[in-house]
Image: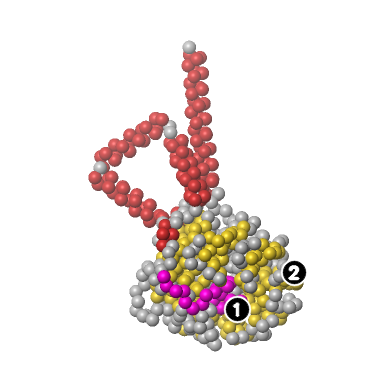
């Protein structure tokens, strides 16, 4: 009898240990999936701007408020009952040894819910406003590539830029998740188009927005299951935008109706599409990370040619029947390929990664190079701008900077303008590279400047927007966006349109600067 009881006791203890061990393993697996499966490290020029920690921090105030109210209510109105329930629960858990299984089950359910959210995509609450307000889109009707044109000026209309940095309005996405507008806006008439990344604790996603620049209302919002860093191109009543960061794969270039946001087609790639397409004569030219560069039909989204075997993340430029782009991984090179066939015409070895989207002036093509990325400088920083003969690829001139040049090179009136991680904005003569002026802005400049005939609009990573004179680089005005929202960072490049400066930010805000009333109080929307 004793042996039977002893055997039963041993088996019972084994079962308890097995249940405990299984629950512990389940708990470990759930936490592994939660924290490591959603935070894959990225070694790219463009950092993963949203992650689980950012998403968690975005809802910490709501969590703390809820917990605080609950605790205060319990302690004030039901203190004795709360203590009694707590002790009973503690004794019950201790007696039945179910703490680990319960926690494991909760985490498992949370992980399952997170997977469901990931598959379902971002919240579509703002999509209810996807109707046109009836206003006619005025002025410029095309924003055909990154920064609007092959001179990368970020300014297409004939109106001058703003003479002060006072916010005319501030748009804030009110969703209960982290939102990042590090995509650069494309402004066509009174419509602003921009991409975004969204993040919750369990999922990441993105969206493309169309916002009325006069009413600040969301006209439409198209959700994506993958975060968006790509900046939109707009032509022929359509919006073209990529999706994904460096660690993402199987991402698409999407075509949306510019008026309604309805999807028209999606072109799937094997990698990510951080770049903005260049639209030329009914064709789209765009880079797709490790999947090379594509030329596709703008109307139907059908492939015309594919140049594989390179990793490129910039917006290419098309000029005189050639497509120019560079690579920032592996073999650092600048390439020229035939715009009709994709056949390589020439390539040129570079000493540093090639990041800055190219621009052209007469028979010259310009690229920004450098070590490091949007977030950090390299241990040994270096950067430069190179000018090459567009026909032969021969280097015409080079200009060294103290750190990476990640920006597009803007061209205005025979001069080139660019920013650097070294904290300066430069102006050089386009033909020979002779420095005209250099203005230090104290903090890294990683977004591309916008240039009008008389003003350069540049943004620093740490939230300052500057207006500099094109002739001497003197500061006309400065506005610190961190007076509106703390710790904002600027990866978005400013666009000048309708007499204002528009720029996105890392903290759910889009800014419109240049109000005539310098005493205006800044507020959301």
Q: Residues within 10 Å of mark 1 (few under 14, many from 20)?
A: many
Q: Position of residue 247 (x, y in %)?
A: 60, 57
Magenta highlight range: 134-154
Front residue (pair 157, 4): 157
Q: Is 135 a magenta residue?
A: yes
Q: Is residue 256 left or right of residue 307?
A: left
Identify the residue at horizontal 52%, vertical 38% (top origin).
26
Q: Position of residue 199 (x, y in %)?
A: 48, 56
Q: Is residue 259 left or right of residue 304?
A: left
Q: Main secondary structure of the magenta part?
A: loop
Identify the residue at horizontal 52%, vertical 33% (top origin).
21
Give the residue number, with chain letter if any, for mark 2. 344
Q: Position of residue 74 (x, y in %)?
A: 28, 45
As drawn, the label of residue 151 is: 1
Q: Residues within 10 Å of mark 2 (few under 14, many from 20)?
A: some
Front residue (pair 395, 305): 305
Vertical side of 506 occupied by 106: above or below: above
């Amino acid at each position: 009898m004793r042996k039977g009881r002893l055997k039963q006791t041993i088996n019972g203890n084994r079962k308890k240990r097995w249940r405990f061990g299984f629950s512990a393993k389940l708990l470990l697996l759930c936490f592994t999936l939660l924290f490591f499966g959603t935070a894959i490290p990225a070694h790219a020029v463009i950092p993963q701007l949203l992650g689980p920690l950012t998403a968690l921090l975005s809802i910490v105030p709501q969590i703390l408020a809820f917990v605080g109210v609950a605790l205060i209510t319990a302690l004030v109105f039901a203190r004795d009952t709360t203590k009694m329930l707590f002790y009973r629960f503690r004794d019950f858990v201790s007696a039945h040894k179910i703490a680990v299984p319960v926690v494991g089950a909760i985490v498992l359910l949370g992980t399952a819910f997170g997977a469901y959210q990931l598959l379902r995509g971002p919240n579509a609450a703002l999509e209810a406003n996807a109707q046109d307000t009836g206003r006619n889109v005025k002025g410029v009707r095309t924003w055909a590539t990154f920064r609007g044109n092959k001179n990368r000026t970020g300014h297409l209309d004939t109106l001058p830029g703003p003479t002060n940095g006072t916010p005319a309005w501030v748009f804030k996405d009110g969703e209960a998740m982290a939102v990042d507008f590090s995509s650069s806006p494309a402004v066509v008439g009174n419509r602003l188009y921009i991409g975004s990344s969204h993040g919750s604790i369990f999922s990441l996603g993105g969206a493309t927005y169309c916002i009325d620049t006069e009413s600040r209302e969301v006209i439409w919002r198209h959700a994506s299951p993958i975060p968006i860093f790509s900046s939109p191109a707009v032509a022929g009543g359509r919006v073209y935008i990529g999706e994904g960061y460096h660690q993402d794969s199987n991402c698409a270039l999407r075509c949306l109706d510019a008026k309604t946001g309805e999807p028209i087609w999606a072109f799937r790639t094997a990698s990510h599409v951080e770049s903005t397409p260049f639209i030329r004569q009914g064709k789209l030219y765009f880079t797709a990370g490790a999947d090379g560069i594509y030329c596709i039909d703008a109307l139907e989204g059908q492939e015309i040619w594919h140049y594989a075997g390179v990793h490129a993340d910039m917006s290419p430029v098309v000029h005189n029947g050639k497509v120019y782009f560079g690579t920032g991984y592996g073999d650092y090179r600048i390439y020229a390929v035939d715009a009709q066939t994709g056949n390589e015409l020439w390539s040129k070895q570079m000493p540093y990664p090639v990041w800055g989207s190219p621009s052209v002036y007469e028979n010259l093509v310009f690229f920004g190079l450098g070590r490091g990325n949007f977030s950090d400088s390299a241990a040994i920083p270096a950067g430069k701008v190179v000018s090459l003969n567009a026909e032969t690829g021969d280097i015409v001139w080079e200009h060294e900077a103290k750190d990476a040049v990640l920006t597009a090179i803007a061209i205005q009136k025979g001069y080139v303008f660019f920013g650097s991680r070294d904290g300066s904005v430069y102006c050089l003569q386009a033909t020979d590279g002779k420095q005209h002026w250099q203005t230090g802005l104290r903090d890294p400049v990683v977004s591309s400047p916008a240039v009008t005939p008389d003003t350069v609009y540049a943004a620093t990573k740490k939230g300052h927007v500057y207006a500099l004179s094109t002739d001497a680089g003197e500061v006309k005005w400065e506005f610190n966006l961190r007076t509106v929202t703390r710790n904002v960072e600027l990866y978005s490049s400013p666009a000048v349109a309708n007499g204002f400066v528009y720029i996105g930010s890392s903290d759910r805000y889009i800014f419109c600067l240049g109000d005539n009333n310098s005493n205006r109080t800044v507020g959301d929307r």
